[in-house]
Image (cartoon, rainbow, N blue to C red):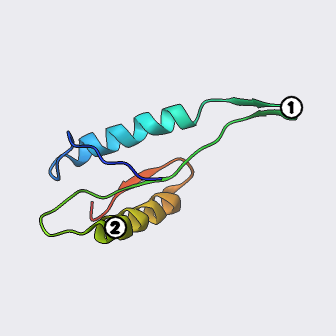
Amino acid sequence: MGWSCRSVNRADTDGALAFARRVQTVLNADVGLASGVVRPSASIGVATARVGATIEDMLRESDQAMYLAKGAGKGSAAVFGG
């Protein structure tokens, strides 16, 4: 899944991480199933736009950041190059 935030600029990695944490809060809500309650989680990678970057660059960078987040532990977020 991917999304773009126009209000978050390259210098505002704190804002990007805050947005990622808000998404995680929504995703971490308990889900009731017939077999019981589960709590999903997500590791989120953030890439910020820069002049000359292609969509492929952005996807690759956010994917690399996601793997950094996974390495940091369940439900983490990381910024590419941050």
Residue 38 in percent (x, y) is at 73, 36
Residue 21 in percent (x, y) is at 42, 39
Q: Residue 61 carries which label?
A: 2
Residue most extreme to the right: 35
Residue at the image position 60 percent from the left and 30 percent from the top: 29
Q: Which secondary structure, mark 2?
A: helix
Residue at the image position 33 percent from the left and 44 percent from the top: 17
Classify 64 as above or below 11: below
Q: Crowdedness of circle 2 by 10 Å Cα count: few (<14), some, many (20+)?
A: some
Residues 9 and 18: in front is 9
Residue 45 relative to residue 37: left or right = left
- Return the disc, 1 or 2, that comes first in the chain's sequence: 1
Q: In which quarter of the image is residue 49?
A: bottom left
- Dot 1 amino acid type: Ala
Q: Mark 1 points at which residue?
A: 34
Residue at the image position 58 percent from the left and 35 percent from the top: 28
Residue 32 in percent (x, y) is at 76, 28
Residue at the image position 57 percent from the left and 51 percent from the top: 74
Q: In which quarter of the image is residue 55?
A: bottom left
Classify 49 as above or below 23: below
Q: Crowdedness of circle 1 by 10 Å Cα count: few (<14), some, many (20+)?
A: few
Q: Quadrant of residue 41?
A: top right
Residues 8 and 76: in front is 8
